Image (cartoon, rainbow, N blue to C red):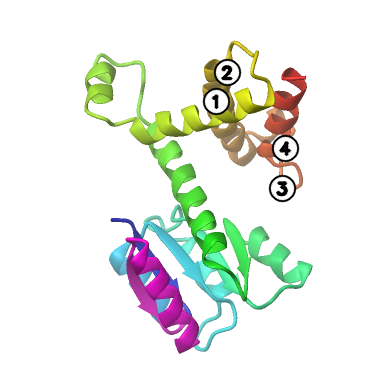
Amino acid sequence: MKKVLLIEDDIVVRENTAELLELANYHVITASNGKLGVNLAKKHLPDIIICDIMMPELNGYGVLQILSKEIVTKHIPFIFLSAKTERKDIRKGMDLGADDYITKPFDESELFSAIESRLAKLAIINENSKSYLTKEVDQENREGFFIVYKRIVHRLREMILAVNPNYKFATSLASTVIEASLHQHFLKDHFSSITDCNSDEDPTEFLSSLTLNLLK
């Protein structure tokens, strides 16, 4: 069961959102302000954090800034949940390192989609960190270590075939796109001089362009 930390000062929103998540089989930890949220994040190390922006004690921007500097919490996916809908507010949250931004009011499908996509991305990154080039890889594969990774590759393959049913390398293209995405994200963060991807050009845009042109 995935663990979600929900940081929200509005008791109605907090309780309603927590109930939705619990019904979807998430283990939910709640915090009524940013300062408490930071402490609970360090204590419980949730799989994902959903955080309001305007809160007492410490606002959402401050929560993200603190957690992004801590070794044990900086890689936890972080989603802002806020009534602040102006572009500058959204841009500020993303520039600080947020993974997504959901505006209130929201529907449950939007919330679940954001959570599931971020958890899937994290699963790919974690599984990709395993070395394929070892003698244990076949045994690890039989034990299901890469099941989430393979499921996402197969899902992307079906999307490719939906665009071009006659493309005969759909599975190879799907796995290549995923590996390339991870690689470009790494280059963007650590070797920016050898990639065109940056804060304005996301690897997703590059790979979408590459894939769609290939399938024409």
Q: Is residue 38 visible?
A: no
Which labelled disc corresponds to residue 205?
Answer: 4
Location of the N terminus (image quadrant): bottom left
- Residue range corresponding to the magenta coloring: 10-35
CA distance separating discs 1 and 4: 18 Å
Kind of residue sitting beneath label 2: Ala
CA distance separating discs 3 and 1: 28 Å
Q: Which picture quadrant has residue 29?
A: bottom left
CA distance separating discs 2 and 1: 5 Å
Q: Which picture quadrant has residue 208?
A: top right
CA distance separating discs 3 and 4: 12 Å
Q: Nearer the viewer, residue 82 or 109?
A: 109
Label 2 sits on residue: 170
Q: Could you say whether the residue bearing mark 3 is in a helix, strand or loop?
A: loop
Give left or right: position of 121 versus 106: left
CA distance separating discs 3 and 2: 30 Å
Q: Nearer the viewer, mark 3 or mark 2?
A: 2
Image location (x, y in percent) of residue 89:
72, 71
- Crowding around mark 3 (Cα neighbors within 10 Å: few <14, some 14 to 19, many 20+) is few
Label 3 sits on residue: 199
Kind of residue sitting beneath label 4: Glu
Q: Decide which of tag 2 and tag 1 comes sooner along the chain.
A: 1
Label 1 sits on residue: 157
